[in-house]
Image: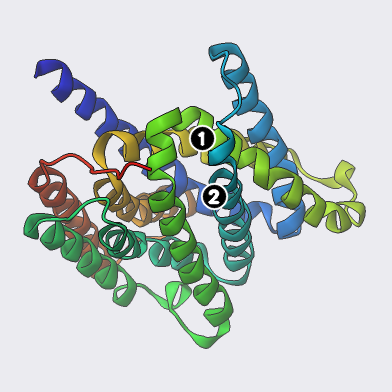
Amino acid sequence: MITQRKSDGLTDFGLIALAAIWGVNFSIVKVALNELEPLAFNALRFPLAAAALGWIVFRGTEDLMPQREDVPRILLLGLIGNVLYQLAFIIGLDWTYAGNASLLLATTPVWTVILSAAAGHEQPNRWVIIGIMGTLIGMVLVVIGSDDQLSLGSTTLRGDLLMIVGSIFWSVYTVAGAKPVARYGALRMTTWTLWVGTPILFAAGIPSLLQTDLTDVSAQVWWAIFYAGLFALALAYVIWYHGVEKLGNSRTAVYSNLVPVWALITAWIWLGERPEMLQLLGAASILIGLTISRLGQTSTTVIPEV
C-alpha cells in the first residue's frame, strides 16, 4: 500500500511538471514563430524528439517492434497525435495568442471523459465530474477576466477554432492509446507514434525550410527548438502516457487544466503580463477542481481485452 501511494504521488508530481513544461512551451513557441514558419519549426523539432526517444528505447529493451495486429492502431495513433494534433496546434498557435491557445486546449478533459465513457474504459463518479466542472469554471473565469490580448475576438477566430479541434484530436489520441499503452508501456508507444508522425511533418516542412536561411536564425530560436523537441514532445509524451497507464484517462486529462495556470504565471514573471483578479480566481478554481477530481476517483482504469 505504501509503495502504491508513493508511485501515485510520483505520477502526480510528474503530471504537474508536465503541465509546467507545456505551459511555458506556449510562450517559447510563440516567440520562435516570429522567425520561423510553423511547418519549418515542426520539421526541426520532431526529428530531434524522435531520435531522442529512439535512442532511449533501443538501449532499454530488446523488443523494439509491436505485434503485427497492433500496427494499424499505432499507425492511426501516430497520425492523430503527431500529425493532425500537431498541425492544429502549431498553426492554431501561429494564428492566435499564446493565452488563447493554452486556455482552449484546457477543454481536453471534457472530450476525454466523453470519449472514455463512450469507449467503456472508465466511468467517472460524481466527484470526478464535480472536479472537472470546477476546472472548467476556472477556465471560463480566466477567459472572461483577461484583457484584450487574450480575448476570443474575430481576429483570432481561425486559431481559436483550430485549438479546439486540436483538443479533440488529443483526447482521441489519449483514449485510443490506453490499451496499447497498457500492453507495451508509455515509452515504446510514444516512440512508435512519433516515428509515424515525424516523416510526414518533416516532409510538410521542407518547402518552408528551403525558403528559410537557417544561418540567420537566432540562438534563442534554436534553444526553443531544443526545448520544444526534447521537453515539450519527447519527455512530455512519456509522462502523459505514463499518467494514462497509472491513473486512467480522465484523471490524467484533468491535469491539462493546469497548463493555462502555468502559462499565466510564466507570462507574468517572464513577459510582465499581470493577471487580473478573475484570472487568479480562475486559477484557484482549477487547482481546487483538480484536487477534488484526483482524490474522488479511487477505482482503477478498466481497459477492455481484445
Q: Which mark is residue 189?
A: 1
Residue 62, relative to residue 27: is it above or below? Answer: above
Q: Amino acid at mark 1?
A: Met
Quadrant of the snapshot with the C terminus:
top left
Say which residue appears at 23% left-offset and 42% top-offset.
301
Q: Which mark is residue 121?
A: none
Q: Amino acid at mark 2?
A: Leu
Q: Secondary structure at mark 2?
A: helix
Q: Are marks 2 and 1 in contact (CB under 8 Å)?
A: yes
Residue 217, relative to residue 4: is it above or below? Answer: below
* Residue indicated by mark 2: 77
Q: Taking 184 as reference, is 281 left or right? A: left
Judge whether residue 50 can be spotted in this image.
yes
Q: Taking 183 as reference, is 195 left or right? A: right
Say which residue appears at 28% left-offset and 66% top-offset.
139
Mark before the other along the chain sequence, 2 or 1: 2
